Amino acid sequence: MTAAATGTSRRFRRSALTGAVLATALGAGAILAACGSGSQADAGTGPAKLSVADSYIPLPPAGGMAAGYLTVRNDGGQDQLVKVSSPGAESITMHRSTASSMEQVESMDVPAHGALQLSRGGNHLMIMGWQKAPALGDEVELDLTFAKSGTIAVKVPVKELTYRPGQN
Ligand SMILES: [Cu+2]
């Protein structure tokens, strides 16, 4: 009787312990999974989700060198703009403006859940060697190549020299 009671008690305690360990393991697993997906998005290692907005090229004088402006929005992980080309122009380079001048760069970061902005006074594209001098109202195809997302082709309108996005 005494032995049986002890046995029952031991079995009970063992299964209670197993239950507690299991609950802890499940709890830890759930927390790890939540952290895992959260930190992945924060670190920007998921796929980028890119879209291009506010693109325009101010009309260059006499078919000369032009600037190009646009915004690359990103609703996903980080990416990089690594190349810009166009069937309508020989050379397109990426420039970063510094305090007093500008410098050519080989790539531009597209931050996770953020945007890469090319705008007046800041980062911009320099377009040279037009096949045909652009005119107001033309649309110039730009092929934007990203490190992870591949190439996105956009039609960029040629606007007045003084145009700013939000105006017509
Ligand atoms: Cu420049």
Image (spheres, rainbow, N blue to C red):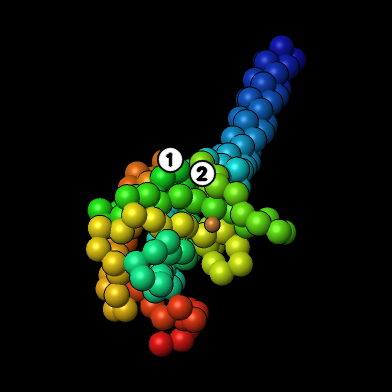
Label 2 SS: loop
Q: Amino acid at mark 2?
A: Ser
Residue 115 drawn at (x, y percent): 53, 60
Label 1 SS: loop
Closer-to-camera residue (37/118): 118
**Going 25% across and 53% down the picture, which residue do you hit?**
87
Disc sitting over residue 126 in the figure: none
Query: Which quarter of the picture shows residue 83?
Result: top left
Closer-to-camera residue (167/115): 167
Choose the circle earlier in sequence order: 1 or 2.
Answer: 2
Residue 26 drawn at (x, y percent): 59, 35
Which corner quadrant of the figure contains ligand 1? bottom right
Q: CA distance from mark 1 to mark 2?
A: 9 Å
**Residue 4 appears left or right of 74:** right
Q: Amino acid at mark 1?
A: Ala
**Going 46% across and 64% down the picture, which residue do you hit?**
67
Pointer 1 residue: 147
Query: Which quarter of the picture shows residue 137?
Result: bottom left
**Going 62% across and 54% down the picture, which residue do you hit?**
102
Tag in front: 1 or 2: 2
Residue 94 drawn at (x, y percent): 49, 51
Residue reaching furthest to the bottom: 168
Q: Quick one: quadrant of the C terminus?
A: bottom left
**Residue 77 appears left or right of 31:** left
- Kindly indicate whether the residue at mark 2 contacts the one at mark 1 (C-beta within 8 angstroms): yes
Residue 125 visible in rendering: yes
Total labels drawn: 2
Pointer 2 residue: 107
Residue 1 visible in rendering: no
**Going 52% across and 60% down the picture, which residue do you hit?**
124
Closer-to-camera residue (76/24): 76
Residue reaching furthest to the top: 3
